[in-house]
Amino acid sequence: MPQLTSFRFSPTQAAIAALFAGACNVFAFAPYGYWPIQILALALLFHLLQQAASVKAGVLLGWLYGFGWSVVCVYWLYISMHQYGGMPAPLAALAVALLALLLGAFPALATGLATCFRRDRTVPAWITLLLVLPALWMFSEWLRGWVFTGFPWAISGYAHTASPLTGYAPLIGVYGLGWLVAVLAACLVLLPGKKSAGVLLLAILALGLGLKSLSWATPNGQPISVRLLQGNVPQEIKFDAEQLNATLTLYEDLIRAAPADLIATPETALPLLAHQLPVDYLPRLAEFATASNSHLAIGIPISDGPQQYANSVIGIAPTPANRATPKLYRYDKHHLVPFGEFIPFGFRWFVDMMNIPLGDFSRGDALQAPFSVKDQWVLPNICYEDLFGEEIAGQLRASNAAGNPVASLLLNVSNIAWFGDSIALPQHLQISQMRALETGRPMLRSTNTGVTAIIAPDGKVLAQLKPYERNVLTASVQGYRGITPYVAVGNAFIVLLALALLLAAWYLARRTPSSR
């Protein structure tokens, strides 16, 4: 990159370049998949930071980059707030912009601290680029994953479900991939003056390709037959009182159309609280489960008392001959969506502006048992819960440590019809692919409008339905057992590694002579 490293940007040019580079990130993720764009964009940001005249300038560059990145990757939130939530268009657009500004603060923190480190110390550029910036970049994405309950949608690592970095996912998870992306970007900036940077870049990519051939899990028991239902119920009529009976009939017919070891519906496929269903509705499904030897996983909201609602999956297994009534399995969503599923303190006014049914759910337990289906154990997660890989890994790790059944299959049930026919659908599929890679388990997805799919432990999509079609995905799926390194330690390893790199950078800076 000789031309880039020799070109000096004016402050205005640098700001525009940072904003543009951030926006280009959208092409690295699904449905586009041009992952090298992300590394090039980040390399441009890192180069701009090397020229930043002040810490304030470094913060501004990171903020603009993060704003451009976020606003184009999650613009579809406008659809949910305006088209389906009824919020006036200007306010919905403002809300998306404010969220993008908030998300932009995380990379701004990283770039500001890195600029501060560089300006306060006379150190070789490689220390800032290879040690400091990648570590701080990882920390910024990790913080974004849990501060204010977290919203790590479209963070760097998700672009690499089919890149040479894929092989690292079972070891260091999605945040670790983000750190590697930053290291590669730093190598590109250093490449014109340091041939060793090119060697490091090629070594990281080559090792990633080699790691893809490793399998961290082994088959568990016999495969099971699955039927994943995609009802394609339009969001604008999903909770319409006049359409409720039609929706209940639709899903009963889809369930009863054929037997399978596991039949799964989307999130809140039954748009009534369980106690509001016709009294014989669930018993009829239980009779079918017993008669056909099928296991049902049904998305439904459940009330445990006045103003106590849970976004749940209930499991109905065949009833043994010695039991009079079926024993129900229940999973309650733990990681709730701010504003959509719980109301943050002081924001009741904001939620009241939108027409969101059941907008204040109760939170399920962090650790919940999987659902037994013949030889397999199925662990559900609901909608954007699969955005939080450390929580899914934590459930597997805790079950293994306690000697309890460990899930051999993951099941995501979703309804993201709220976001229309937008890039949110393929982006969410890519998130599920990352969870399969991290855990070494297949991920089953049953969604209302898409993308209903079956994902292999190596992250590859084995089968999927076209979005916005009413259909059923039928397949035989093999469960897997085993603990990947990421499941074993979660994010602890990459966080400690980043801390070690920052300490190493501080130590080297102290020992570096006062000239470059």
Image (cartoon, helix red, strand yellow):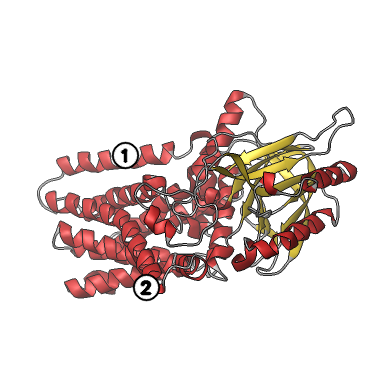
Q: Which mark is residue 90?
A: 2
Whole-number angstrom distance, CA of label 2 to CA of label 1? 42 Å
Corner quadrant of residue 187: bottom left
* Residue 507: % across, % down: 21, 38
Corner quadrant of residue 9: bottom left
* Residue 43: % across, % down: 33, 63
* Residue 152: % across, % down: 43, 53
Judged left or right of residue 219, residue 319 is right
Corner quadrant of residue 6: bottom left
Q: What's the amino acid at mark 2?
A: Pro
* Residue 475: % across, % down: 78, 55
Q: Which mark is residue 499?
A: 1
Residue at figure coordinates x 40%, y 63% from the top left: 39
Q: Which mark is residue 370?
A: none
Q: What's the amino acid at mark 1?
A: Leu
The answer, for residue 312, to whether it is visible in the render is: yes
Residue at figure coordinates x 61%, y 49% from the top left: 213
Give the position of the N terminus as an image quadrant: bottom left
Residue at figure coordinates x 63%, y 43% from the top left: 302
The answer, for residue 193, to whether it is visible in the render is: no
